[in-house]
């Protein structure tokens, strides 16, 4: 279990540096509207992640039924391919100049927080790649183990990833104003290349792992 928890924490840390659309809106919301507003937005992103995890879990179970004879080698190959694709897209993603307007006064009414929550929810749901990387994350959880993870182990694995992911997001929100001078297009391009390389590395690992399983 300790190895699984370590894998979950490392995976959560890696996912937390992925620079999707929500990343930029999260920083902008924190700078322009405050920490609580950014937390409301991030809560919407978190709920959408959980929705996608449920969808991916249902799908991954179906794939496991098709690959029972291969010790889930097929699911690892598919997950590896998805990691490779997403890593490639991230590596070559173009980054434009970031411009954030001056901070405006934000109404602290509950309606405004609900609007931000829905905004975060819909923004993340609108990104079809999200379900792909959650599917890949589940495949990574299965890799390197003698037996497929049980339902409880997968639950713990994903819960730790989400907790790590959300914790890093909170740190981003709190430190947004301090980090703002350092967030440049050049820095984001470098981070994209580092993140993309890591994702493609995971992809290669999963594909090789699936080939080894097939050859046994």
Image (cartoon, helix red, strand yellow):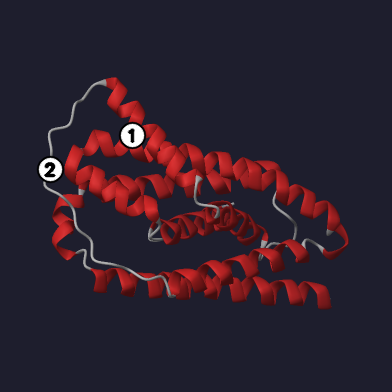
Residue 190: x and y in percent read 32, 75
| Crowd around label 2: few <14 · some 14–19 · many ≥20 (10 Å) | few
Question: In screen coordinates, is 32 left or right of 54?
Answer: left
- Judge whether residue 111 can be spotted in this image: yes
Q: Residue at x 55, y 47 (%)?
A: 158
The label shown at residue 103 is 2
Q: Is residue 51 above or below residue 97?
A: above
| 40 with respect to 143 (left or right) | left
Most extreme residue toward the top is 110
15 vs 119, nearest the viewer: 119
Depth order, front residue of 134/96: 96
Above or below: residue 28 compared with residue 185: above
Residue underneath mark 1: 116
At x 33%, y 34%, the residue is: 116
Question: Disc number at residue 190?
Answer: none
Secondary structure type for disc 1: helix
Mark 2 to mark 1: distance in Å?
16 Å
In this rendering, the count of numbered labels is: 2
Residue at (50% x, 57% y) in the render:
6
Of label 2 and label 1, which has the lower sequence position?
2
Q: Is residue 153 in view?
A: no
- Mark 1 crowdedness (10 Å alpha carbons): few <14, some 14-19, many ≥20: many
Quadrant for residue 52, please give it. Answer: top right
Which corner quadrant holds the C terminus?
bottom right
Q: Residue at x 84, y 52 (%)?
A: 65
Q: Are marks 2 and 1 in contact (CB under 8 Å)?
A: no
Q: Quadrant of residue 91?
A: bottom left
- Is residue 141 rendered to the left or right of residue 105? right
Picture coordinates of residue 75, whole percent (x, y): 73, 61
**Mark 2 secondary-structure assignment:** loop
Q: Which residue is at the front of the view, 96 or 131? A: 96
The residue most toward the right is: 69
């Amino acid at each position: 279990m300790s190895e699984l928890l370590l894998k979950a924490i490392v995976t959560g840390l890696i996912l937390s540096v992925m620079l999707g659309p929500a990343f930029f809106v999260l920083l902008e919301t924190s700078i322009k509207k405050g920490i609580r507003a950014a937390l409301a937005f991030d809560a919407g992103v978190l709920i959408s992640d959980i929705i996608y995890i449920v969808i991916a879990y249902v799908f991954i179970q179906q794939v496991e039924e098709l690959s029972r004879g291969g010790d889930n080698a097929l699911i690892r190959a598919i997950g590896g391919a998805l990691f490779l694709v997403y890593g490639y897209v991230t590596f070559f993603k173009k980054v434009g100049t970031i411009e954030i307007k001056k901070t405006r006064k934000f109404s602290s009414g509950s309606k405004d927080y609900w609007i931000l929550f829905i905004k975060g929810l819909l923004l993340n749901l609108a990104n079809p790649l999200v379900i792909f990387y959650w599917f890949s994350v589940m495949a990574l959880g299965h890799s390197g183990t003698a037996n497929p993870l049980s339902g409880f182990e997968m639950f713990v694995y994903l819960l730790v990833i989400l907790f790590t992911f959300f914790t890093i997001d909170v740190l981003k929100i709190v430190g947004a104003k301090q980090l703002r001078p350092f967030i440049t297009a050049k820095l984001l391009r470098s981070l994209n290349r580092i993140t993309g390389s890591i994702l493609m590395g995971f992809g290669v690992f999963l594909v090789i792992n699936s080939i080894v399983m097939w050859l046994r």
